[in-house]
Image (cartoon, rainbow, N blue to C red):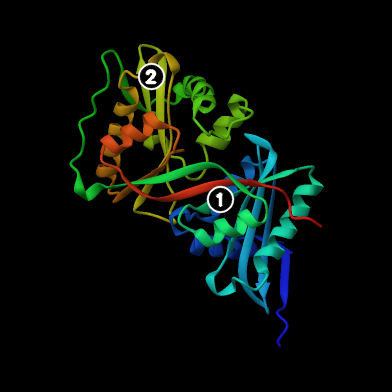
Amino acid sequence: MAVVGIDVRACASEDEEARSLAIHNIVWPHRAVTMDEVRSFKEACKDYGDFLGAVDGEEKGSAAIAILPQRPKAGFLLLTVLEDGRGRGLGSALYATVSEWARERGLEEIHASAMEDDEESLAYAKRRGFREIERYPRLVLDLSTIEEPVVQPPPGVEILTWADHPDLARGMYEVAVEAYADVPGGDTEEMEAFEDWLAHDMQGSGDRPEATFVAVAGSEVVGYAKYFITEARPTVAFHDMTGVRRSWRGRGVARALKQAQIAWAKRAGYEVLETSNEERNEPIRRLNADLGYSLAPGRVLLEGPPAPR
């Protein structure tokens, strides 16, 4: 019987990182990004590792693991193996390698994602001690099926763009401090300082000031909403964050922000909008459903231990 040769190595160049990303994008087409987004993501991480895996000399898998500032006690893992490379030990080899990376940095937990309809991957993770901690159904809006909505903010509120009003950044941060902490299943254990949040969450390659909308009442920022946009999916805009100040919730601010986003996307020529909300976040899920978004398979966030030595 032929012996399968498994090789896992750390990416030593951006060319290798690009090949690792290409594997990820094949396995996760609805989460595809470009190397520009990878660079922005790496800059936002406390630490980052990227690995390529080969079977008999052919690259069939990749694994990226990061320590995020919001969750510094766990490694966030994206492990992908092409369909024709599965069942041959490559996934286990990649998992063992990133587990060593995590141990060297004092991490005792790993967070990983799987599609909620991917029973094979979920079973693989469960056998290795992973358990579900969060679930993010995906919602999709086909813009060809709707008319451009009328933006209807509550009385006393204006909807502006960040591009036209860059001075609103500090107020947006104040909203984010409240919103991040209150998102059910949210990933914020530690809120970054203003300048770090601005660089990592608002000024990455997928962030556009002209596609970031701010709700203002007088001189107070009461909410904001932003897209994540990548050239890897040029017809799709992804709702990255919608946040409203606690004292203004339930008054129509989020709806007006979403209406502004949809209207902008229609005018800009996008075909599809996507979002992903943790299933316990009932208010935003109700709003999205009311605006016409339809349910699609999403992702499950899993927590588990590093592989045993």
List x then y, in percent, for residue 98.
72, 55
The answer to whether residue 30 is above or below residue 193 is: below
Where disc 1 sits, the SS reads strand
Q: Quadrant of residue 231?
A: bottom left
How many labels sit on residues?
Answer: 2
In the rendered image, which residue does mark 1 sit on?
A: 113
Distance, label 1 to label 2, CA atoms, is: 30 Å
Q: Tell me the kind of residue under disc 2.
A: Arg
Give the number of the disc on residue 249.
2
Q: Nearer the viewer, residue 195 or 275?
A: 275
Of the 4 image quadrants, the one containing the N terminus is bottom right
Q: Position of residue 182 (x, y in %)?
A: 50, 25
55 vs 147, left or right, is right
Q: Earlier in the sequence, mark 1 or mark 2?
A: 1
* Amino acid identity at mark 1: Ser
Figure quadrant of the C terminus: bottom right
Q: Position of residue 131 (x, y in %)?
A: 61, 46
Give the x, y percent position of residue 303.
Answer: 63, 45
Instruction: Name the front one of labels 1 and 2.
Output: 1
